[in-house]
Image (cartoon, grey):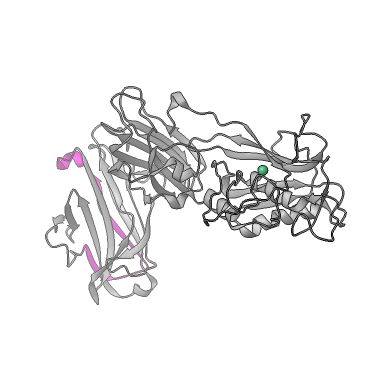
C-alpha cells in the first residue's frame, strides 16, 4: 500500500500523441528491451473496440480494414485480446465505449504541431498498484494526409497520398493496451512515425511484461488456522505484482479455492509489522482491504465470498505510518471459515507422490452439520468426520483406513478403539483406524460430541489428515493435500 497520507491519485485522463517525423531513428547498439510501462492496463487483458469510420485511402483500402488489421496484429502476437464492434461512437465522450474516429480537432482543442493522432485513456483506481484502464479512445487528425501501405514511408517511384494509417493505428492501439512510448529501441511504440510498419519484439514483450506480474511473485496455498510468516526483502513487491507504479511495499500471496459461498475471517497480528490485508480474485480484481486498527499493528478482514479462486494478500506500507509498527518483520495470520457444507480437502496425493484420483472431504461442526468451521471455543461440542472417494483402482482391495492428527511437532493416530496414540517417534507403519475391503465411499467418524474443555484443551491448533492404504503395500498411504484444520481459541465466539 502507498502511505495513506501520501496517496497519489492516478490521473483520470492521460493523453498520448504520435508525432509525424521523418527524422532517422538511431538504432540501439545493444539489444535490450526497454519498453516503457507505467503499469496501467486493462483488467483481464481484454477490451471491446468500436470501429466504424467513413472512407478509404487512395490505395482503395478502407480505414476500417486497416484499423481492424492492426487490432488483429496485436491479438495474434500478444496476450491482449481486442474484440471489435462495428459501430461508430464519439471518441471524445467519456461513456465507457472505446472508439476511433477522424476529427478536425482534438475534442475542441487544437491537435498541436505535427500530431497525427491522440489516444485518451481513462482509469479506474485500484486498491493496489496502478489503475485499470476503463476506456481508451483514439482521435485521428483529419487535417493530416493518410494513405495505407507497407514498407518505408518514402518509396522510390511511389507517390502515396500521405503517411501510412495502418502503422498509426498499430501505435495508438499500443497506447490503448497500456504501453507508453519507447525511446531507445526499434518499436512501433517509438514517439515518432517511422519506416517500421509491423509490431516489433519490443512492443510484444511490453504487453507480455504488463500482464505477467503474477509470475514475479511466489504463491502459497492458504492454510486455515494460524501460520507464522515474515515480510521482508525476499518477498515480491506491489510493483512486481502489478507491473508498474512506484509502490515498493512487500507482500505475501496466499491462494484459496471455495466450492461454495463461505464466510471467511482473517486476522493478522504482529508486534513489529504493520500488516495490510487485501482480498482479490486470482485474476487480480481487488475486492476489499483492511489497513489495520488505530492503536496497534493488527489488521482484520471479513468477507462472504461466492465459489471461486481467490488471493489473500498480506501487504504493508511502502513507508511506516505508525511509530511502533514497521514495514518488515514477522506476523501471524489466523484464517477461519464458516460454510454450510463440508469443504473439499484438496486433491489426492500419496506418501510416494503417486498419481491418484482419490477424493477427500471432511469437516468439523458444532451444530450437528448446519455449519462447518475450523475455529471453535473450548466448550463447543464437536463432531469431526471425513469421507473418502477411493481411487477406482483400489476399490474392492483389502486395505485399511488411517486418521492422523498433527499438533505442535506431535503425530497422533486414531486406533481401532477410537483413541489417539502418540506415534511421533515411529509414524510408520501406520496405526490402522479400520481394516477392511475398500469400498467406493469410505466414511470416517473421527469424533462425536467432543468438548475440548472436557479434555483440558483451551487453546490448540491441530491438523487432521485421513487416508487409506492397501494391504499389498502398507507403507503407501493415499491422503489429501489440504489438512482438516482445527483451532480451539479461548472465548473466540466462533462455532456458536
Ligand atoms: Zn504515441
Q: Is residue 250 left or right of residue 260?
A: left
Q: Is residue 421 above or below residue 313?
A: below
Q: Is residue 451 visible?
A: no
Residue 310 part of the magenta segment: no
Quadrant placement of the N terminus: top left
Q: Residue at x 63, y 46 (%)?
A: 177
Question: Residue 155: x and y, percent?
Answer: 79, 59
Q: Residue at x 28, y 39 (%)?
A: 376
Q: Provide the residue span drawn in magenta.
A: 432-457
Closer to the camera in the image, 200 or 10: 200
Closer to the camera in the image, 97 or 465: 97
Q: Is residue 261 left or right of residue 50?
A: left
Q: Is residue 193 left or right of residue 482?
A: right
* Quadrant position of ligand 1: top right
Question: Residue 295: x and y, percent?
Answer: 32, 22
Question: Residue 25: x and y, percent?
Answer: 65, 50
Amino acid at each position: 500500500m502507498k502511505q495513506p497520507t501520501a496517496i497519489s491519485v492516478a490521473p483520470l485522463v492521460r493523453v498520448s500523441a504520435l508525432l509525424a517525423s521523418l527524422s532517422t531513428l538511431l538504432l540501439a547498439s545493444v539489444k535490450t528491451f526497454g519498453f516503457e510501462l507505467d503499469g496501467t492496463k486493462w483488467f483481464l487483458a481484454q477490451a471491446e473496440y468500436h470501429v466504424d469510420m467513413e472512407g478509404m485511402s487512395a490505395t482503395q483500402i478502407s480505414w476500417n480494414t486497416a484499423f481492424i488489421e492492426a487490432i488483429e496484429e496485436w491479438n495474434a502476437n500478444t496476450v491482449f485480446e481486442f474484440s471489435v464492434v462495428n459501430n461508430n461512437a464519439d471518441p471524445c465522450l467519456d461513456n465507457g465505449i472505446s472508439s476511433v474516429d477522424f476529427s478536425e480537432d482534438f475534442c475542441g482543442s487544437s491537435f498541436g504541431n505535427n500530431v497525427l493522432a491522440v489516444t485518451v485513456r481513462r482509469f479506474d483506481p485500484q486498491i493496489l498498484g496502478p489503475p485499470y484502464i476503463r476506456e481508451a479512445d483514439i482521435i485521428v487528425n483529419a487535417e493530416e494526409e493518410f494513405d495505407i501501405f507497407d514498407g518505408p514511408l518514402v518509396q522510390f517511384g511511389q507517390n502515396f497520398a500521405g503517411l501510412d494509417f495502418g502503422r498509426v493505428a498499430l501505435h495508438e492501439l499500443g497506447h490503448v493496451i497500456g504501453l507508453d512510448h519507447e525511446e531507445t529501441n526499434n518499436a512501433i511504440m517509438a514517439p515518432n512515425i517511422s519506416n517500421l510498419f509491423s509490431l516489433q519484439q519490443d512492443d510484444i514483450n511490453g504487453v507480455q511484461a504488463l500482464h505477467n506480474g503474477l509470475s514475479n511473485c511466489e504463491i502459497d496455498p492458504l492454510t486455515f488456522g494460524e501460520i507464522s510468516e515474515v515480510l521482508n526483502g525476499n518477498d515480491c513487491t506491489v510493483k512486481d505484482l502489478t507491473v508498474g507504479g512506484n509502490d515498493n511495499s512487500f507482500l505475501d500471496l496466499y491462494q484459496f479455492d471455495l466450492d461454495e459461498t463461505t464466510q471467511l475471517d482473517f486476522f493478522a497480528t504482529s508486534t513489529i509489522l504493520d500488516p495490510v490485508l487485501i482480498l482479490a480474485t486470482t485474476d487480480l480484481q481487488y475486492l476489499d482491504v483492511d489497513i489495520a486498527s488505530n492503536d496497534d499493528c493488527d489488521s482484520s478482514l471479513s468477507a462472504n465470498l461466492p465459489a471461486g479462486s481467490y488471493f489473500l494478500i498480506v501487504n504493508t506500507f511502502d513507508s511506516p505510518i505508525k511509530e511502533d509498527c514497521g514495514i518488515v518483520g514477522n506476523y501471524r495470520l489466523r484464517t477461519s471459515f464458516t460454510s454450510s457444507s463440508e469443504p473439499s480437502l484438496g486433491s489426492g496425493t500419496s506418501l510416494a507422490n503417486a498419481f491418484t484420483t482419490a477424493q477427500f472431504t471432511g469437516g468439523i461442526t458444532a451444530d450437528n452439520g448446519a455449519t462447518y468451521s475450523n475455529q471453535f471455543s473450548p466448550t463447543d461440542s464437536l463432531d469431526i468426520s471425513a469421507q473418502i472417494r477411493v481411487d477406482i483402482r483400489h476399490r474392492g482391495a483389502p486395505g485399511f483406513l488411517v486418521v492422523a492428527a498433527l499438533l505442535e511437532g506431535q503425530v497422533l493416530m486414531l486406533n481401532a478403539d477410537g483413541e489417539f496414540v502418540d506415534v511421533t517417534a515411529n509414524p510408520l507403519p501406520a496405526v490402522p483406524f479400520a481394516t477392511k475391503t475398500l469400498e467406493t465411499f469410505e466414511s470416517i467418524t473421527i469424533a462425536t460430541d467432543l468438548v475440548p474443555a472436557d479434555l483440558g484443551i483451551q487453546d490448540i491448533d491441530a491438523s487432521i489428515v485421513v487416508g487409506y492404504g492397501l494391504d499389498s503395500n502398507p507403507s503407501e498411504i493415499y491422503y489429501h493435500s489440504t489438512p482438516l484444520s482445527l483451532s480451539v481459541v479461548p472465548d473466540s465466539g466462533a462455532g456458536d
